[in-house]
Image: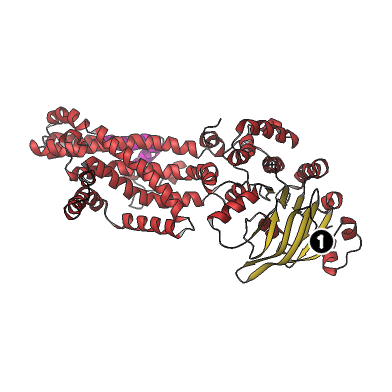
Amino acid sequence: MSSPEAVVRVEGLHKRFGPLEVLKGIDLDLHQGEVVVIFGRSGSGKSTLLRCVNFLEDPTEGTVEIAGVRLGGGHRTRRKREQIRQLRLHVGMVFQQFNLFPHMTVLENVVVGPVCARGDESVTRTRARELLDQVGLADKADEHPIRLSGGQQQRVAIARALAMQPDVMLFDEPTSALDPELTGEVLAVMKSLATDLHMPMMVVTHEMGFAREVADRMVFFHEGVILEEGPPQQMFGSTRSAETRTFLDAVL
Amino acid sequence: MSARTVPESRGGTPGRRGDRLDRLALASARIPFRLKTAAVWLAIFAVVAAFFAIAAFDTGWMADQLSYIAGGLRYTLYIALGGITLAVVLAVLGALGRISSNPIAYGISGFYVSFFRGTPLIVQMFLIYLALPQIGVNLSSRYPAVPQSVSDALVLDAAVAGTLALGLNYGAYMTEIFRAGIQSVSGGQGEAADALGMTYGQKMRKVVLPQAFRVIIPPTGNEFIAMLKDTALVSFLGVTIASAEIFRRAQLVGKADFKNLEALIVVAGMYWALTALFTVFQRRLEARVSRGHVRMGSAGSGGRR
């Protein structure tokens, strides 16, 4: 399963919240240009895995390797915090609730990350406008997020993450907070990221249509372990475990 | 028909008296509430003015001393503005300490809040004004190596000592206001900043604090108005005559001429006018801030646009 060109390498990952063990030993690689869709029941640990990959949660055991830096959990010394920050500069994250900064304009939302990281505002502004154009929101640059629909906000959030020029994008249920008629525009942007830019992506989602169409690999989480993984044709065709089949029958 | 809905006066059957009261109540209902309130205030002022006349207040003396006492207004405002500025800085630091996972920061801020909320403001003022110079004297007598400048530096002007005490004391109370304001910013905001690779300082400056200030500004206005009145305590430190604030001045001239009542009424009026004025500002600011993210946004985003 592990190969040299992995963009993200998760090894032996455990996460405990007190007595509750949410992740029970996860090994997962994400390769160059690959889209992995992670699915499973709520509480199965999908989001926790994503949050562990950029250390929004500290892994209890195991390591995450991105851009040649391998990190584990544990006490956050000054050095460790800086290592985590460096790792995060390689990772774009899109949240279920968008988490745009409400006190900034759309353009400022996209610009603030690169400005904090690198400080070259003029280049960044030009680039931010390109990115907003890419997600179809060039005309909203000077609006505040509160004036945008949920779908538009999530597209801004994607542009904001892309502005960091990440090596990998993490999507944590990006369409779950959206009205059904707004999911399409967000999924379309994500699809073009995958097919046009070959951006490596880890996507936690219940959108099985998107998975079938875009995913290179699907990973089924069940009670904190990866129960089954494989390409979409295999998953939607002959799934081996009863659990996976039950779940897919329920969501399809 | 509508007369029936007006409550009857005590006495059971509606007689002529009851009818008259009914008509009065009806007439009164047509006058706007604000106008009636204004009438009540006017009546109170009239009573007070009558009292002035009866008690033979020396209004001429009051007019004569007005400009001298008002000369202290700038010192009152200096002390209050200096105090609130110091308090805001301390409250930001204190609040960051209260939410910190660093035991040193948490411990220091906890001690600070506990001590300055747990002791009277006037005691703190005297500690800074009287106790610091004593420390200086003791130090230089016991350790000759301590330069004179150190013990000199510990002797503070009363207005400075008072400003420091006000800032420290109010900062401790405002620490809790600021802590609550910071914690009112949703966790997702901090996570988004983290995910963008911001440092702790960047996250606070660019994302968390600008949003927290929306919540913090209105109660900070209240604290400022309260502090404005507490500047009167500085007069107990025996300020030099030249830089005396209004209460000190009122006491000086009031005692000298045995016109204490007149002097105190003048100075009370000044505090009242000041707080009324700043309450108006405060209301406007509050309205502006609560107008939502959109307005505060361009003002709070570091002036980039």
Question: Is residue B36 among the parts visible in the rendering?
Answer: no
Instruction: Please say whether residue B32 is one of the residues in the magenta stretch.
Output: yes
Which of the colour schemes (rainbow, by chain, secondary structure, one colour) is used?
Answer: secondary structure
Instruction: Please say whether residue B28 is one of the residues in the magenta stretch.
Output: yes
| Tag 1: amino acid | Met
- Eyeballing the image, is A231 above or below B73? below
Q: Image quarter for residue A37?
A: bottom right
At 33% from the left and 38% from the top, the residue drawn is B81
Q: What range of the chain is rendered magenta?
A: B19-42
As helix, strand or loop, the secondary structure at mark 1 comes to loop
- Eyeballing the image, is B199 above or below B58? below
B215 lies left or right of B193? left
Residue A110: x and y in percent read: 64, 38
Report the residue marked by disc 1.
A1
Question: Is residue A183 among the parts visible in the rendering?
Answer: yes
At 60% from the left and 53% from the top, the residue drawn is A83
Q: Residue furthest front?
A: B145
- Which part of the image, by quadrant, shows the C terminus of chain B? top right
Q: Residue under mark 1: which chain is it in?
A: A
Is B261 in front, or is B95? Answer: B95
Residue B75: x and y in percent read: 25, 35
At 37% from the left and 38% from the top, the residue drawn is B279
- Eyeballing the image, is B63 above or below A115? above
Residue B34: x and y in percent read: 38, 36
Q: Residues within 10 Å of mark 1 (few under 14, many from 20)?
A: few
Residue B243: x and y in percent read: 20, 34
Q: Residue furthest left?
A: B257
